[in-house]
Image: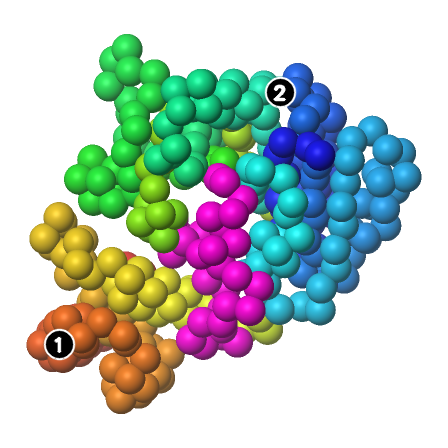
Amino acid sequence: MKMFTILTPTFNRATTLPRLYESLLNQTEKDFLWLVADDGSTDNTEELVNMWIAQNKIKIEYYKLPKGGQHKALQLGYYKAKTKYLVKIDSDDAFLPDAIENYKNEWEKIEAEKNKKIINICAQSMYVNGEIVGNWRFPPDIKYIDSFWHEMVLKRNNHNELSNCTLTKILKEIYPVDYKFWLEDKTNIIDGVFAPRIGKKGTTRYINTIVQVVYSDAPFSSMRSMSTYENKFWKALIDSKYFLDENFTYFFWQPRYFINLSLKLIISSIICKVSFNDLINNIDSKRLKLFILILFPLGISAYIYFRFIKKKFWI
């Protein structure tokens, strides 16, 4: 069995998948299989991937689902993965040639250290021009930091877009195939919701190594038949709700972060015409419910200000 599964959820990315495929062919370490989870593409994605499977240059598994959103493709990918480790990469990005080699070397170091607390490795991403994605930088001469999501984001302000290589069993635990979330018929639930869940399961090793190139040339392909504008607010609503609900106990680590996110939740619910009762009834945390109740008048005022005075939302 291979050591790594490289999971790519995709929808109508036949124009960008060849770039990712070429980057996989160029890997210096071949101990992986590529699992493509197709969210009902209507272009020639299926024919393209089947052609690569027939060429048999790398091990590929291809699964096509009825259209349901990236979250459904991820669920299927995590369910189907059988390797010890899993790396997710978007269908419009690419790996550097030594990406999998770097991950393998780091996991072998961790195993040699007998450090069973580490369940995830985060590596850096860069743009085509070589610039690191995000503003956070490692301290000089530091090769790695063993930490967890809440400390790195809420205390160190590391909001960089990172590549994750995670123990597959952890991903299966935090996102089982039968998992459903509130309003999942409206929009995707993004990876950022699951990163804190990984943080609660164990330690992450953040390595000062670039493994991934992030591109921005892919055409937009919304998961639902709604405008990009409308979808943006549904995403803000869902992402804010789940992050706040699951992480509100960390409020005092960075209060301003949680206040802004709570205002985003309230404003998004107003724009999406989700009733106050529906919003409150779908919040599990009692502390968050109380906080939203207290903050709601300010949220309405903020909505009026951005809607009628600024005429632009910051979300």
Question: Is residue 239 visible to the viewer in this orientation of the structure?
Answer: yes
Q: Check disc 2 and report its element: helix, strand or loop.
A: loop
Question: Is residue 6 visible to the viewer in this orientation of the structure?
Answer: no
- The answer for how far apart the CA atoms under marks 2 and 1 are is 50 Å
Q: Is residue 17 above or below residue 207?
A: below
Question: At 9% from the left edge and 76% from the top edge, which residue is drawn?
Answer: 294
Q: Check disc 1 and report its element: helix, strand or loop.
A: helix
Question: Does residue 190 belong to the magenta stretch?
Answer: yes
Residue 97: numbered disc? 2
Badge 2 crowding class, 10 Å Cα cut-off, few under 14, some 14 to 19, many 20 or more, is some
**Would you identify the image quadrant in which residue 56 lies?**
top right
Q: Label 1, on which residue?
A: 290
Question: At 71% from the left edge and 64% from the top edge, which residue is drawn?
Answer: 65
Image location of residue 290, percent across then percent down = 13, 76
**Could you tell me if the residues under marks 2 and 1 are in contact, i.e. CB atoms within 8 Å?**
no
Residue 78: numbered disc? none
Relative to 296, is 220 on the left or the right?
A: right
Query: What amino acid type should be assigned to the residue bearing mark 1?
Result: Leu
Range shown magenta = 166-195
Relative to 190, is 288 on the left or the right?
A: left
Q: Is residue 265 above or below residue 203?
A: below
Query: What amino acid type should be assigned to the residue bearing mark 2?
Result: Pro
Image location of residue 221, percent across then percent down = 61, 59
